[in-house]
Amino acid sequence: MSFLSVRDLRVHFPTVDGIVKATDGLSFDLEKGKTLGIVGESGSGKSVSTSAILGLHRHTNAVVSGEILLDGVDLLKISDEDMRRRRGRDIAMIFQDPLSSMHPYYRVGNQIAEAYRVHHDVSRKAARARAIEMLDRVGIPQPDRRVDDYPHQFSGGMRQRAMIAMALINNPSLLIADEPTTALDVTVQAQILDLLQDLQRDFDAAVMIITHDLGVVAEMAHDVLVMYGGRCVEYGSTKEILTHPEMPYTWGLLSSIPEVDADPEAKLVPIPGNPPSLLSPPSGCHFHPRCAYRERVPGDLCRTVTPELTPGSRGDGHLKRCHLANPEIVYEQEVLPQIAPDLVEER
Amino acid sequence: MFAYIVRRLFIGVILLIVMSLVTFILFFASPVDPARFACGKNCSLAQIEQTRKALGYDDGPLTQWTNFLEGVVVGRDYPDDPELRKNAPELIADCAAPCLGYSRVNQVTVASEIKEAFPVSLSLAILAFIMWIAGGILFGVIAAVTKGTVIDRGIVAFSLVFYAFPTFFIGLFLLKFIAIKWGLVDVPSYVSIGEGGVGTWLSNLFLPALTLALFFMAGYVRMTRAFVLESMSEDYIRTARAKGLKRGRVLYKHTMRAALTPLVTMAGLDFAGLMGGAIITESVFNFNGLGKLVVDANNTYDLPTLIGLVLLLGAFVIIANIIVDVLYAVIDPRVRVG
């Protein structure tokens, strides 16, 4: 049994227009000390799924079903109060925009110490000392002075460091980072990713990192889960997914990454069309309206039948959701020459 | 911060001087001749001129205005007539600095008129303020927390009713039924704390204050609800929940702190406006407050009283503005440091 095991997770939002299926049948596993990258476009259900793990959805507007087993305990079955006590202590989260994620009226140290005091019966002074220790740990200079600053006095990178300090202050065993570097400068991004990797080694936490940047995934994640329209469309080890993807959507993601040292002849190919509506998603495979390869599948299968998650051609835990026959050959012969001709020559 | 307050006060004084000038100009620009009005229908031209002199409207508007400003600084005698001073000094009213003027209509200095009416309006405004802030925030937060339920809709609908009904209707309704017909409380008439003690003061103020409070409360319920809901969807509230804070703590420490800041501005200005703006309520309950004084002065073309009240109420709004801005800096660290 894995440390975190999510089975058939569904998050549905009933609205007057119908049910919005933000997450529709998501399953994955994650071990301690490992990192899972969740990749997908905006609106593909990444954040909604992780919010469900943290129990942040309100019962009044969201219907969450399935299983979220953390260390053998199903988080969807325990009481709200029990979930609240685990939140921040066992599971912590880092958010996308560190400025709006901190309360503008309270001192940084105050907010970090608060996270500690909810779960530990300690004095203000002890919590403050702990906050300073954590600020030091995440690399904030002069932490004993900066602890009394307000969030707006911090730079973007420092704010995200402070958010990380807040998340890690209770030694959580699962850390969810929701696009932790999206709002930051490129140089700061690398620092923050380094810090996260560093801390993960120290704390031996399981980390889920949500991103739409495959570069971040390549750097950080052991496993990758690609989401599209609320579903997992490809899942496997990072190396496998990045070198032998078997789903046209993943190909699309790979071909949209600009690279500094790429062959100048390589084309940057955007995926045509828009992300699917979660209210009335396309029939069959959600990706079929934007897929360049659906003509290769006989019998209009892509439009009529939803493909199951099936093992990829190379096995080894690689799962893909696609009707296309022999995708590995299509990738090698047609996709790769287009997006990375230099790689083809090497092979 | 101190320099800031001094600067704001200085600007406020200039603003008040301009306001007094504008009031003078508007008064004399009106087609009604105050002397003719005071003298009555069958006055001869000579009688009107005599009345004009008696009322102090014989000088040009600008001269009167500079005299007024001089009076504010050094004080004035009414009438400023050396002959009269020699013959019948008992007829001269002395108005010490800062002299806001002397109402010849009411035969008293404006300062003593204000002294009379001010405690009434202040008591009314304070009590109404406490009631509407407490009620408005309480029901607004309850409505926001129970958004979409029967409780929320009930509160919103109920507050809309009070918002829609005019103050004179609610005032008369309360007076007629609660005080007169059912006799639940005495018919209110203002009694100061000095005369009747806190209990009597409160019980007499209750109905008129409630009348005012219900109207303002309705607006504050709606605003509090909107601000709290807006704040609840902020990222930092999600952070607070992700920390594992209890629901109550997220609400009062994180959500309310941010939601109530804009209310400070509104509350401060509404309070200042209420000092002279409770005209209808004061009339309904026959309280001789500042609002009623303004209306009476207006009806009798009593320029000195009007000027005095315009400046007083203007000063309230200016001071309230300064207090609100200072409070803002206390509440929001981004304003303080930046």
Image (cartoon, coloured by chain):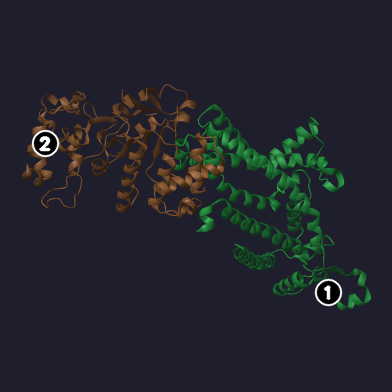
Chain colours: A brown, B green
**What residue appears at the point 24 percent right and 44 percent down from the top-left corner?**
A215
Q: Residues within 10 Å of mark 1 (few under 14, many from 20)?
A: few
Label 2: which residue? A331
Q: Position of residue A289 (x, y in %)?
A: 20, 33
Label 1: which residue? B80
* Residue nearest the observer in this picture, B300 or B332: B332
Query: Residue type at mark 2?
Result: Tyr
Quadrant of image for the N terminus of chain A: top left
Quadrant of image for the C terminus of chain A: top left
Disc 2 secondary structure class: helix
Query: Residue type at mark 1?
Result: Asp
Whether residue A297 can be seen here: yes
Q: Position of residue B265 (x, y in %)?
A: 59, 51
Q: Is residue A306 above or below residue B48?
A: above
Whether residue B41 can be seen here: no
Q: Is residue B106 left or right of residue A331?
A: right
Chain on which label 1 sits = B
**What residue appears at the point 58 percent right and 37 percent down from the top-left corner?**
B140
Q: CA distance from mark 1 to mark 2?
A: 104 Å
Q: Position of residue A108 (x, y in %)?
A: 48, 48
